[in-house]
Every structure is written in C-alpha cells, then in structure tokens.
Amino acid sequence: MLITFYQRLRQHATANPGQVALREHEQELSYSQLIAVLDELIEHYQQQTEQRFALEASNSIRWVVHDLALLFAGRVVVPVPPFFTAQQRSDLLQDSGAQVLINETDSIFLASSNRPELPNGTVKITYTSGSTGSPKGVCLSAENLLMTVTALADRLSAVQVKRHLAIMPLAVLLENIAGVYLSLWLGHEVQLASNRVLGLSGSSSLDLQVFFNALNTFQPESLILTPGLAAAVVAGTQIGAIPASQFKLLAVGGARLPDSLEHAAQLLNLPLVQGYGLSEFGSVVTFNNPAAPAAGTVGQPLDHAEVAIVNGEVVVKGNCMLGYLNQPSSWYPQEILTGDFGEFDAVGNLKVLGRKKNTIVTSFGRNVDPEWLEGLLMLHPEVLQAAVFGGEERLLTALIVCRNSDAKNAGKIAEVVATVNHQLPDYAQLQAWHLIHDEFSVANQQLTGTGRLRRDAIAHAHRHLLNPINSCV
C-alpha cells in the first residue's frame, strides 16, 4: 500500500506543483520539491544494507521526509519519543535492534548486535511507555498505517481543511498518521514547529501566551489535541486571544474529555470532535462525524474497524497490529482487548467509560472512574493536575497540583472540591484531598509521554497520604 501513498504524493505534485506540502518557520517544501527530496533519499536508503532506522528529531521537515523516504525504501522506522527518559531511550534502541540513528543533523551507526525477529510486514515500530514506564514496541504494517489514513479521509470528506499544525510529537503515532500522513494524502499543508515555538515544555507544561501567539502566527485550520490542550484552546477563545473562526477541525483524543469542556467548546462554535484509538490498532478506531458530532461519545467506528463490547470491555478487530516486538506469542492477533470499559448509544456511537485497571471499587461496592473526577477538578483554573485514588481500604482521595503553589490556595482548592462534590453522586464524592507541590511529570516518572498519569508511581510516591486515617488538609 505504500506505493499508493507515494503515487498520491506524485499526483499532488503534478496537479498542484506549487502547493506547500511542509512548512517550518521560514522553510517550506512544495509538493514538487517534496517528491524531488524523497526520490533522492529513497535512492540513498535503498543503497544501504541497514534495515532498521531510529528517528530522533524535533517536529521538523527533516523528520517527515526521512520518515517517508525510509518507508518508501522498504526500511523499518523506529521513532524515538522526545519525552522518553535517557534509560527509556537506551532501552528502545537496544530492544528494537536499530542499526542507524537519524538525529537533528546527522546519521549515526549503532554498534548494537541485537536484531530481534520482526513479524512479517513490519514497516514501523512505535513505542509506547504506557502506565509502567517500560517501553513496548508495537509492530505495524503499511496496511495498518494506510487503512487508518483512508478510513479517516472518508470520515472527514466534508471537512475542507487546508492547513494542519502538528502539536503533538511526530513520534506519537496519532500525530504521525492522523496529522501528517492524512494531510499529505489529501494534498494539504503540514505546519511544523518546535516545542519552544509552541510554548510546550515536557509533556505537561504550557506557556499559554506563547501557545496563543503560535496559533495566531501559523493560522492552522486543524489541530490534534489532548484534553489539556483542548482546554487551553477553549480558554484562549473565551478571552479573545485566538479566534474560533480560524479552526475547521479540532480532533481530541488521548484521555477522557470532560463533558463540561466539550459543552464550552460548543458554545464558542469551536469544531471540537472526539475520537478514540490505540497504537495496537494503527491509532484511530472511532471518530465523530464533524458535521453532526454526538456529544459525550467518541463517535462511530471507522470503516476499517469492528468494535464490540464484551463483558463491558471494548474489543476491536479489523486493523490489528502485527504484534509486540520480542513477544512472538502476541503476533498476528485477530482481535485486541483494549482494557477500556465502554458502551454504545442507541445509534452506534461509542462511549468510553474508563480504564478497567483504573476503576475504583468503593467500600460500598460502587464503581468510580477516577478520570471522571479528575476531569471535573481540572476544569477549575486553580487546578493544574489531579490524581484520584480510593478503594475498599482507602478513602476516595484527590492529590492536587495547584497552578500557584502559594499556601493560601488551600482555601481556593477547598472551594473547588466542594463545588465538584456538589456535582457528584454521594458514592463518588471526594472524602479527602491533599496539595502536592511537585508536578506529575515525565522526569519524575509520574506521567507518560502523552500526558497520562502513571498511577502506580504516583501512589507509591505519595503513599503516606493515601490511607484511611488521613483526612483533608
């Protein structure tokens, strides 16, 4: 299927040779220039004997053209997430058997002799740190990648987007496929910028003014957002820092989106649309119809996906990964148990109800999704981060990071918790909370690179606060 992708790029270059394909600050490549660069790189890589190439660079034209050229040359691409720790990075390079590392300026030959067997057809190994911090390589085929692209293109056929700004790291499969590949497949412009230009730091810090300035400078029509970034766009629109009219599609994924945030976006006429997916399925499984999104859901399955609810769990078929690297027992699965609870509404839209392993069972036997409570807490500007824990032997407790660490915020947080509890049924109300002075971050191993909480690490670090005898501050 990769030849089809290459042919699409050539068709764009022939039909619209001057159309910008990739833009980075003052540098740009038209579709005709992109084809010329790709042809040169493809020939270069086909002459090399090495088969596995790790790609480690910031969001840039360089990242995109090397990624595409390697795929078209029949090599295996191993993106290195920029948010990985030094140890995770080292583990990834060793685990994957990468022979060459392509960085910001150079190509470095690696000395590792480890060459693990790959499932047949592997063209990309995407690593996810998950909730434990141990990188796991997901092996994907060209069919995995392009079935997702074509299914998304069909679902978005009525959306006239011309400029997409990549905000998430390109090593994140969602941005790589639904951002870059989809835009190029459709002949659109992909805008690329460093974290510094976007106001991003790590995976959890954002300079709002820098972020708003970047959006006003690039004028993108589409973005892929985490719920945290979606909240920033909503806030910027509310204060008039960015115009809602510039956007034609704001795709949200990665974690649960609070209903109230989705409602706020609707009131502002922001085209915010939820989707759902996982790397093991080539990224996207379901996506709302932008013309008529179903609030509170992640939409209906894309054409390449079959989704069922089995014992309350979301199970997917149709575009399953080739398998996990170094785990032959996982190769060529026919279905994937996602680990997410879910249900369908009356017309077939999927509602994701939370992670099975995260569900809290209270002492009264009621199930509580911590992401529900965390989302409500983080709607308040005083709250930067929140993690909720509980169980039969533990009070339902929130660990809260303030935007301002001044101790006087304790009073404000008490008001926030009271407000949130007023919105909750009695069995789900917070019984205790504590202010945490250090942010949950990738650096302290309490966040994944895509911003998910590493709950076990957080609970261990703050275990003295999470027992039945502690009460509210």
Image: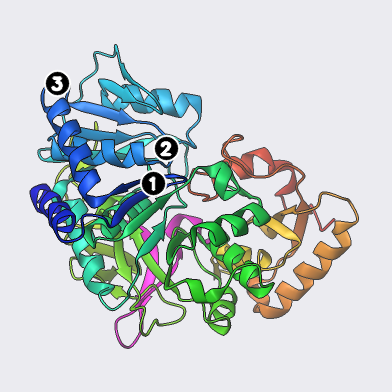
Residue 471 drawn above or below residue 89 = below
Describe the element under mark 3 as helix, strand or loop: loop
Q: Residues within 10 Å of mark 2 (few under 14, many from 20)?
A: many
Q: Is residue 446 left or right of residue 134?
A: right
Q: Residue furthest bottom?
A: 346
Q: Earlier in the sequence, mark 3 or mark 1?
A: 3
Q: CA distance from mark 2 to mark 3?
A: 25 Å
Q: Position of residue 27 (x, y in %)?
A: 40, 43
Q: Earlier in the sequence, mark 2 or mark 1?
A: 2
Residue bounds of the magenta highlight: 337-361
Q: Position of residue 370 (x, y in %)?
A: 57, 62
Q: Residue at x 41, y 53 (%)?
A: 191
Q: Which quarter of the image is occupied by the C terminus?
A: bottom right
* Residue beneath disc 1: 172
Q: Position of residue 89 (x, y in %)?
A: 42, 27
Query: Residue 50 lies in what quarter of the image?
Result: top left
* Between 42 and 438, the one nearer to me in the picture: 42
* Residue beneath disc 2: 81
Q: Is residue 360 magenta?
A: yes
Q: Residues within 10 Å of mark 1 (few under 14, many from 20)?
A: many
* Residue beneath disc 3: 48
